[in-house]
Amino acid sequence: MRADIITLLPQIFEKVFDESVLGSAVKNGLINIVLHQFRDYGDGRHKTVDDTPFGGGPGMVFKPSPLVNCIRDVRKLDVPAPVIGLTPQGVPLNQNLVKELAEFDRIILVCGRYEGFDERIIHEFDFQLSIGDYVLTGGEIAAMAVIDAVSRMIPGTVGCRESVVQDSFYEGVLDHPQYTRPSNWEGLEVPSVLQEGNHALINKFRRSRSLLTTAVSRPDILASTDLSDSDKEIFQNLISPED
Ligand code: ADE
Protein backbone atom coordinates (compact mmCIF):
# COMPACT_ATOMS: atom_id res chain seq x y z
CA MET A 1 0.00 0.00 0.00
CA ARG A 2 1.05 3.56 -0.66
CA ALA A 3 0.10 6.26 1.87
CA ASP A 4 0.55 9.90 0.92
CA ILE A 5 0.56 12.30 3.87
CA ILE A 6 -0.04 16.00 3.34
CA THR A 7 1.31 17.95 6.31
CA LEU A 8 3.14 21.03 7.50
CA LEU A 9 5.34 18.83 9.71
CA PRO A 10 6.75 16.00 7.56
CA GLN A 11 9.84 15.69 9.77
CA ILE A 12 7.86 14.36 12.74
CA PHE A 13 6.92 11.20 10.83
CA GLU A 14 10.44 10.06 10.10
CA LYS A 15 11.25 8.35 13.41
CA VAL A 16 7.88 6.60 13.60
CA PHE A 17 8.24 5.09 10.14
CA ASP A 18 11.87 4.17 10.73
CA GLU A 19 11.51 1.89 13.72
CA SER A 20 9.95 -1.38 14.83
CA VAL A 21 7.10 -3.09 12.97
CA LEU A 22 6.27 -0.09 10.80
CA GLY A 23 9.94 0.44 10.01
CA SER A 24 10.29 -3.17 8.80
CA ALA A 25 7.09 -2.89 6.75
CA VAL A 26 8.52 0.19 5.05
CA LYS A 27 11.92 -1.48 4.50
CA ASN A 28 10.25 -4.61 3.10
CA GLY A 29 8.20 -2.54 0.66
CA LEU A 30 4.86 -3.56 2.19
CA ILE A 31 3.99 0.05 2.80
CA ASN A 32 5.29 3.08 0.97
CA ILE A 33 4.91 6.36 2.87
CA VAL A 34 5.22 9.53 0.81
CA LEU A 35 5.32 12.83 2.71
CA HIS A 36 4.23 16.13 1.15
CA GLN A 37 5.06 19.51 2.66
CA PHE A 38 2.10 21.64 1.67
CA ARG A 39 3.81 24.87 2.70
CA ASP A 40 5.48 24.56 -0.71
CA TYR A 41 2.06 25.57 -2.08
CA GLY A 42 1.80 28.62 0.23
CA ASP A 43 1.12 32.14 -1.01
CA GLY A 44 3.78 34.73 -1.68
CA ARG A 45 7.35 35.08 -0.56
CA HIS A 46 6.54 33.74 2.92
CA LYS A 47 4.63 30.71 1.60
CA THR A 48 1.64 31.64 3.75
CA VAL A 49 -0.83 28.80 4.29
CA ASP A 50 -3.13 30.27 6.95
CA ASP A 51 -5.08 33.41 7.78
CA THR A 52 -7.37 34.80 10.50
CA PRO A 53 -10.98 33.57 10.53
CA PHE A 54 -13.75 35.70 9.00
CA GLY A 55 -16.07 36.81 11.81
CA GLY A 56 -13.21 36.90 14.32
CA GLY A 57 -12.24 34.36 16.94
CA PRO A 58 -9.04 32.71 18.10
CA GLY A 59 -6.48 30.88 16.00
CA MET A 60 -5.79 30.66 12.31
CA VAL A 61 -7.53 28.82 9.49
CA PHE A 62 -5.90 27.08 6.52
CA LYS A 63 -6.39 29.11 3.37
CA PRO A 64 -8.22 27.16 0.66
CA SER A 65 -5.87 27.45 -2.34
CA PRO A 66 -2.54 26.12 -1.01
CA LEU A 67 -4.10 23.01 0.48
CA VAL A 68 -6.40 22.27 -2.45
CA ASN A 69 -3.61 22.77 -5.00
CA CYS A 70 -1.44 20.36 -3.02
CA ILE A 71 -4.24 17.76 -2.71
CA ARG A 72 -4.95 17.94 -6.45
CA ASP A 73 -1.29 17.46 -7.33
CA VAL A 74 -0.89 14.55 -4.91
CA ARG A 75 -4.02 12.87 -6.30
CA LYS A 76 -2.44 12.87 -9.76
CA LEU A 77 0.83 11.24 -8.64
CA ASP A 78 -0.30 7.63 -8.60
CA VAL A 79 -3.31 5.31 -8.71
CA PRO A 80 -6.69 6.78 -7.62
CA ALA A 81 -6.98 7.04 -3.85
CA PRO A 82 -9.47 8.33 -1.29
CA VAL A 83 -8.49 11.69 0.17
CA ILE A 84 -9.08 11.53 3.91
CA GLY A 85 -9.13 14.67 6.06
CA LEU A 86 -8.10 14.04 9.65
CA THR A 87 -10.42 16.07 11.85
CA PRO A 88 -12.27 15.66 15.14
CA GLN A 89 -15.54 15.98 13.13
CA GLY A 90 -14.76 12.90 11.04
CA VAL A 91 -16.26 9.42 11.19
CA PRO A 92 -14.78 7.59 14.17
CA LEU A 93 -12.04 5.13 13.29
CA ASN A 94 -12.71 1.55 14.33
CA GLN A 95 -11.29 -1.84 13.40
CA ASN A 96 -13.86 -2.41 10.62
CA LEU A 97 -12.91 0.85 8.99
CA VAL A 98 -9.22 -0.02 9.44
CA LYS A 99 -9.83 -3.28 7.54
CA GLU A 100 -11.64 -1.41 4.77
CA LEU A 101 -8.83 1.13 4.44
CA ALA A 102 -6.30 -1.70 4.22
CA GLU A 103 -8.05 -2.88 1.01
CA PHE A 104 -6.99 0.25 -0.88
CA ASP A 105 -3.78 0.27 -2.93
CA ARG A 106 -3.30 3.87 -1.88
CA ILE A 107 -4.72 6.38 0.61
CA ILE A 108 -4.10 10.12 0.96
CA LEU A 109 -4.18 11.57 4.48
CA VAL A 110 -4.49 15.32 5.01
CA CYS A 111 -3.34 16.64 8.39
CA GLY A 112 -4.95 19.80 9.75
CA ARG A 113 -3.45 22.28 12.22
CA TYR A 114 -4.61 25.54 13.77
CA GLU A 115 -8.38 25.97 14.05
CA GLY A 116 -9.10 23.84 10.98
CA PHE A 117 -9.68 24.04 7.25
CA ASP A 118 -11.64 26.68 5.35
CA GLU A 119 -15.06 25.03 5.02
CA ARG A 120 -15.05 25.50 1.24
CA ILE A 121 -12.31 22.87 0.77
CA ILE A 122 -14.21 20.10 2.55
CA HIS A 123 -15.52 18.72 -0.77
CA GLU A 124 -11.92 17.83 -1.69
CA PHE A 125 -12.07 15.12 0.97
CA ASP A 126 -13.73 11.83 0.17
CA PHE A 127 -14.42 11.66 3.87
CA GLN A 128 -13.14 12.92 7.20
CA LEU A 129 -11.78 10.62 9.87
CA SER A 130 -11.45 11.10 13.63
CA ILE A 131 -9.38 8.91 15.92
CA GLY A 132 -11.47 9.80 18.97
CA ASP A 133 -13.64 12.31 20.73
CA TYR A 134 -10.88 14.67 21.78
CA VAL A 135 -9.00 17.41 20.00
CA LEU A 136 -5.36 16.98 19.03
CA THR A 137 -3.14 19.91 18.10
CA GLY A 138 -3.07 18.58 14.57
CA GLY A 139 -3.80 15.61 12.36
CA GLU A 140 -0.25 14.23 12.33
CA ILE A 141 -0.61 11.96 15.35
CA ALA A 142 -3.99 10.83 13.96
CA ALA A 143 -2.33 10.00 10.61
CA MET A 144 0.31 7.94 12.43
CA ALA A 145 -2.40 6.05 14.29
CA VAL A 146 -4.29 5.35 11.04
CA ILE A 147 -1.18 4.10 9.24
CA ASP A 148 -0.08 2.01 12.21
CA ALA A 149 -3.47 0.30 12.49
CA VAL A 150 -3.92 -0.13 8.72
CA SER A 151 -0.45 -1.53 8.15
CA ARG A 152 -1.05 -4.28 10.74
CA MET A 153 -3.78 -5.54 8.38
CA ILE A 154 -1.41 -5.87 5.44
CA PRO A 155 -0.23 -9.49 5.23
CA GLY A 156 3.45 -9.73 6.12
CA THR A 157 3.58 -6.62 8.31
CA VAL A 158 2.98 -8.43 11.57
CA GLY A 159 5.07 -11.60 11.71
CA CYS A 160 2.31 -13.94 12.85
CA ARG A 161 -1.08 -13.68 11.10
CA GLU A 162 -2.77 -15.44 13.99
CA SER A 163 -1.80 -12.59 16.28
CA VAL A 164 -3.64 -10.08 14.05
CA VAL A 165 -6.74 -12.24 13.86
CA GLN A 166 -6.73 -12.48 17.65
CA ASP A 167 -6.40 -8.70 18.08
CA SER A 168 -8.88 -6.84 20.19
CA PHE A 169 -11.77 -5.69 17.95
CA TYR A 170 -10.69 -7.87 14.98
CA GLU A 171 -13.63 -10.22 15.40
CA GLY A 172 -15.81 -7.70 17.22
CA VAL A 173 -14.57 -8.64 20.71
CA LEU A 174 -11.67 -7.58 22.91
CA ASP A 175 -8.57 -9.76 23.14
CA HIS A 176 -8.27 -12.31 25.95
CA PRO A 177 -5.72 -11.70 28.74
CA GLN A 178 -2.18 -13.06 28.27
CA TYR A 179 0.28 -14.48 30.81
CA THR A 180 3.91 -15.58 30.73
CA ARG A 181 6.42 -17.07 33.20
CA PRO A 182 6.67 -17.19 36.17
CA SER A 183 3.42 -19.08 36.77
CA ASN A 184 3.20 -17.58 40.25
CA TRP A 185 4.16 -13.92 40.48
CA GLU A 186 3.76 -12.07 43.79
CA GLY A 187 1.20 -14.69 44.81
CA LEU A 188 -0.82 -14.28 41.60
CA GLU A 189 -1.28 -17.61 39.76
CA VAL A 190 -1.67 -18.04 36.02
CA PRO A 191 -5.06 -19.77 35.43
CA SER A 192 -4.39 -23.50 35.64
CA VAL A 193 -6.14 -24.31 32.33
CA LEU A 194 -3.42 -22.35 30.49
CA GLN A 195 -0.71 -24.45 32.10
CA GLU A 196 -2.23 -27.82 31.34
CA GLY A 197 -1.87 -27.88 27.53
CA ASN A 198 -5.41 -28.98 26.55
CA HIS A 199 -5.88 -26.73 23.52
CA ALA A 200 -9.63 -27.18 23.18
CA LEU A 201 -10.06 -26.10 26.81
CA ILE A 202 -7.55 -23.26 26.39
CA ASN A 203 -9.47 -21.92 23.36
CA LYS A 204 -12.75 -22.13 25.22
CA PHE A 205 -11.28 -20.39 28.27
CA ARG A 206 -9.79 -17.60 26.14
CA ARG A 207 -13.00 -17.08 24.20
CA SER A 208 -15.02 -16.86 27.42
CA ARG A 209 -12.56 -14.31 28.85
CA SER A 210 -12.78 -12.27 25.64
CA LEU A 211 -16.55 -12.29 25.72
CA LEU A 212 -16.71 -11.46 29.41
CA THR A 213 -14.23 -8.55 29.14
CA THR A 214 -16.10 -7.20 26.14
CA ALA A 215 -19.47 -7.49 27.88
CA VAL A 216 -18.15 -5.62 30.93
CA SER A 217 -15.90 -3.01 29.26
CA ARG A 218 -17.50 -2.47 25.85
CA PRO A 219 -21.11 -3.66 25.76
CA ASP A 220 -21.62 -1.27 22.81
CA ILE A 221 -19.36 -3.32 20.50
CA LEU A 222 -20.73 -6.62 21.75
CA ALA A 223 -24.23 -5.49 20.79
CA SER A 224 -23.20 -5.30 17.12
CA THR A 225 -21.18 -8.56 17.08
CA ASP A 226 -22.64 -11.77 15.64
CA LEU A 227 -22.32 -14.35 18.40
CA SER A 228 -21.95 -18.02 17.45
CA ASP A 229 -23.97 -20.74 19.16
CA SER A 230 -20.93 -21.68 21.25
CA ASP A 231 -20.52 -18.01 22.31
CA LYS A 232 -24.15 -17.98 23.43
CA GLU A 233 -23.51 -21.19 25.34
CA ILE A 234 -20.52 -19.56 27.06
CA PHE A 235 -22.74 -16.65 28.16
CA GLN A 236 -25.43 -19.06 29.29
CA ASN A 237 -22.84 -20.86 31.41
CA LEU A 238 -21.65 -17.59 32.92
CA ILE A 239 -25.21 -16.78 33.97
CA SER A 240 -26.07 -20.28 35.22
CA PRO A 241 -22.95 -22.47 35.49
CA GLU A 242 -23.36 -26.17 34.61
CA ASP A 243 -21.73 -27.34 37.82
N1 ADE B 1 -7.19 16.46 14.47
C1 ADE B 1 -7.43 17.01 15.68
N2 ADE B 1 -8.09 16.17 16.48
C2 ADE B 1 -8.29 15.03 15.76
C3 ADE B 1 -8.92 13.80 16.05
N3 ADE B 1 -9.50 13.55 17.21
N4 ADE B 1 -8.92 12.85 15.08
C4 ADE B 1 -8.36 13.11 13.88
N5 ADE B 1 -7.76 14.26 13.56
C5 ADE B 1 -7.72 15.22 14.49
Image (cartoon, rainbow, N blue to C red):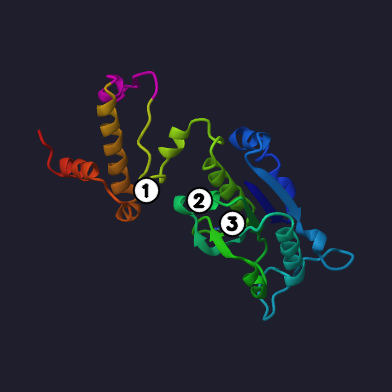
Q: Are marks 3 and 1 in contact (CB under 8 Å)?
A: no
Task: Give the position of the C terminus as an image quadrant.
Answer: top left
Q: Residues within 10 Å of mark 3 (few under 14, many from 20)?
A: some
Query: Considering the numbered disc 2 on the image, is that residue within a helix, a strand or a loop?
Result: helix
Q: Is 182 covered by the magenta stretch?
A: yes
The magenta region covers: 180-197
Query: Considering the numbered disc 1 on the image, is that residue within a helix, a strand or a loop?
Result: loop
Identify the residue under disc 1.
Answer: 172
Q: CA distance from mark 2 to mark 1?
A: 13 Å
Residue drawn at the location 30% of the way across and 20% of the way down: 195
Query: Considering the numbered disc 3 on the image, is that residue within a helix, a strand or a loop?
Result: loop
**Residue 26 in view, yes or no:** yes
Identify the residue under disc 2.
Answer: 98
Q: Nearer the viewer, mark 3 or mark 1?
A: 1
Q: Is mark 3 within 8 Å of ligand 1?
A: yes
Of the four image quadrants, the one with ligand 1 is bottom right
Residue 78, above or below 182: below
Q: Nearer the viewer, mark 2 or mark 3?
A: 2
Residue drawn at the location 71% of the way across and 48% of the way down: 34
Q: Is mark 1 within 8 Å of ligand 1?
A: no
Q: Are marks 2 and 1 in contact (CB under 8 Å)?
A: no
Identify the residue under disc 3.
Answer: 136
Q: CA distance from mark 2 to mark 3?
A: 20 Å
